[in-house]
Amino acid sequence: MSFKTVERKPLTLAERTYIPQILGGMKTTFKHLVKPKETLEYPEARPAILPGYRGVPTLVMDPNGREKCVSCQLCEFVCPPKAIRIKPGEIAAESTNAHVEKAPEEFDIDMLRCIYCGLCQEVCPEEAIWLQNVFSVSGYSRDEMVNNKQRLYELGGTLPDQHFKWDKKKAAEEAGNDAH
Amino acid sequence: MIQPAQPELVTVTIDGKEVSVPKGTNVIEAARLVGTDVPHYCYHPKLSIAGNCRMCLIEMGMPMADRATREPIMDPETGKQKIGWIPRPQIGCATNVAPGMHIKTQSPLIKECREGVMEFLLINHPLDCPICDQAGECKLQEQATGYGRGYSRFIEQKNVKPKRTQLGPRVMLDDERCVLCSRCIRFSKEVAKDDVLGFVDRGSYSTLTCYPGKELANNYSLNTVDICPVGALTSTDFRFKMRVWFLKQTNSIDTESSVGANTVVWSREGVIYRITPRRNDEVNDTWMADSGRVLYKEVQAANRLTAISANGATATLEGAIAAAAELAKGGNVAVVGSGRSSVEEQFLTKKLAAAVDGEAFLVGRVGEGDGLLISADRNPNTRGALVTGLIDKLPESDLSALGAEIDAGRVKTIISVGEDLSAAGLSAEQLAKVAIVFIGTHGSDTTAAAKVVIPTLTVFEKNGSFINQQFRLQKFAKAIPGPAGAIDDLVVLDELIAALGGEATDGDLKSVWKSLNAEVSQLANVTYANLPATGLLLDSSAWAGLSFPEGESLHFKPAAAEASA
């Protein structure tokens, strides 16, 4: 094994005074003092969420205030961590939406289990479940971390789509076969 | 109907594969034998042929022969007899095989036919699979995937039909989903003998309806829901409860009567959602009674027992067994077995009666048979009690004999295995005179009066077997776990026998069957694990002299009637 001896150069005068190094550092510091801020005062200030962001799954209503979910349970079936629990139920005959027949009686999403994969949104045939812009959830107990149906609709709000699939179905039902 | 031992076979060629099938088989069944699926809606193996859905179209041909000389015409290319293909497709369900017949089920013409039929069927179909209860077991879904074209060319308005018609107390009809296969109509007419359904109106306006002023209320109405290939007929009990793909299927036996209809129990996470029939051509074909489909509700009944008690206080199993043994050791014990217990439990009940040196009673339940799938004997396992030797004559319908013994002071303790003694005819005074040990599932006046109560499992929560009216040994399997606190009947009986110094087993099916093999001659060569799904017919000659209450029913003739016929 052979060694190579490296000669250590003596420090120059400028290096020994340390002044250029301090000035270089101060330059960076003062540059950042006057530059616009890159960070946010989270959680008081929140970042703008881009459209298409996949945050917390929510349930949505259509523009007429009808709950879109018909409790087909496909999201429950597809959910990889089994975070979704649905108890299907029948819509009361006197309801204006009685022609839709089915709606969830209970709809729970366990946010301790949810992995934000978005498969529930992808599989939903009624476009009723959407991953929206809420990205941070917290709670003091495990129960608080389970979003029930009421909470899911609070988070979800209204989807401004204009399909009105079931309204069209109802209109056709009322018009009957004579409309052909 | 007695099948000939060797049915006459004919050889046919299906998609180039030669197969020998019994004469009179139709093309759908013949194709099934070679593993080919011919899609169909209106055809059902247990109903007459209607031939109206046109889904099972196949191409068929016969070997050609010269008309004048009857000489076979040979194909010079293959060196075989030329096949004269019929230029139009034929329906498979109404085509019975003939010797030498050639069938194509996969040709381009057939593919086009199926696409065409599917397109017509879907024209007026609402496509509301997300809310339809049939989704997941819907023939229309399956065959649209398998044979449909995948998109719709129909841009016009779909037909409107009644969506929520209550056909009867248990059956709901959605006419828009109906594909007019007429299975339900044929079932009502041919099997249930209650001809109330029919089509009205013409063409695409055809609608299934009930005869005015009548309803589909017979005790077999829910079979129409089972055989409906689409979601037109749905069960009001199961409607919107759970999607079928979540449900686990477990083979079971209907406990309503001694027919022993084969069933499937559908459960999810320990909750039963429905019971449907399971095909057994020797017992119930593909049918079962509506009354048997709600029996799962007993699992979560309000009076279900879940706490062990001894002398009025909550107890451990050991404590309760010790208390029961203490009562039974005093002598003068009677054991009331049950025709609703499994063969294995009845065998242990017999051992228990031997251990306490007491008389064994059984409560007979005789009703009126309906000639189809509910027999007069409403105990599912009276024959089991005979075969295991628990009883040697048919049970009386009440316990008046036991009542007389109590009045005479000869019985001081009664061990009841699941039987409600007051419902079986013992008065409150008689019950007050004796100490009762109750081993069963549901609370009653008897459990209120009992000194020791040990909760056990329902038929859905354990494994076992029943012997039906044909002396057919059939097994049922555990669909769901029992509630907390309930203990397996075999364990309880076994512990009790052991505490009384009798011949105990290990308290599981395997060891009980070992004893059954050794001690019951009819079951000497039977292994529980190898029992076929269709059951095993036992030798019944030893009980030919008994006058069983059953009349004639589906696939069953009473021995007396059979002898005279």
Image (cartoon, rainbow, N blue to C red):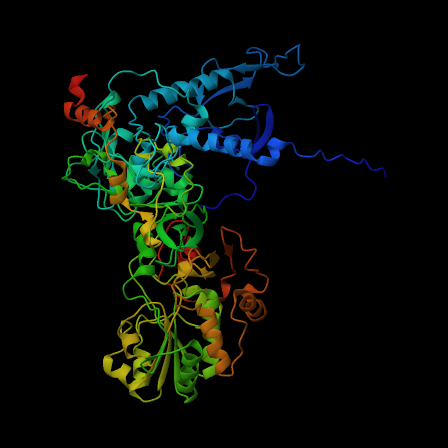
Q: Which of B397/B353 is in front?
A: B353
* Image location of residue B141, percent across then percent down: 39, 30
Q: What residue appears at the point 65 percent right and 31 percent down from the top-left corner? A: A12
Q: Quadrant of residue A17?
A: top right
For residue B396, above or below residue B429? above
Q: Is residue B104 left or right of residue B559?
A: right
Residue B88 visible within the image:
yes
* Image location of residue A93, percent across then percent down: 16, 40
Task: Name the image quarter holding the N terminus of chain A.
Answer: top right
Name of the residue lying farthest toward the right: A1
Q: Is residue B511 left or right of residue B479?
A: right
* Image location of residue A143, percent across then percent down: 33, 53
Q: Quadrant of residue A66?
A: top left
Q: Quadrant of residue B325?
A: bottom left
Q: What residue appears at the point 40 percent right and 43 percent down from the top-left corner? A: A114
Q: Which of B2/B32 is in front?
A: B32
Q: Which of B61/B331 is in front?
A: B331
Residue A72 visible within the image:
no
For residue A91, above or below residue B338? above
Please tell me how many numbered marks the rendered image carries.
0
Q: Is residue A24 left or right of residue B314?
A: right
For residue B123, above or below residue B286? above
* Image location of residue B194, percent across then percent down: 26, 42
Task: Name the image quarter holding the C terminus of chain A.
Answer: top left
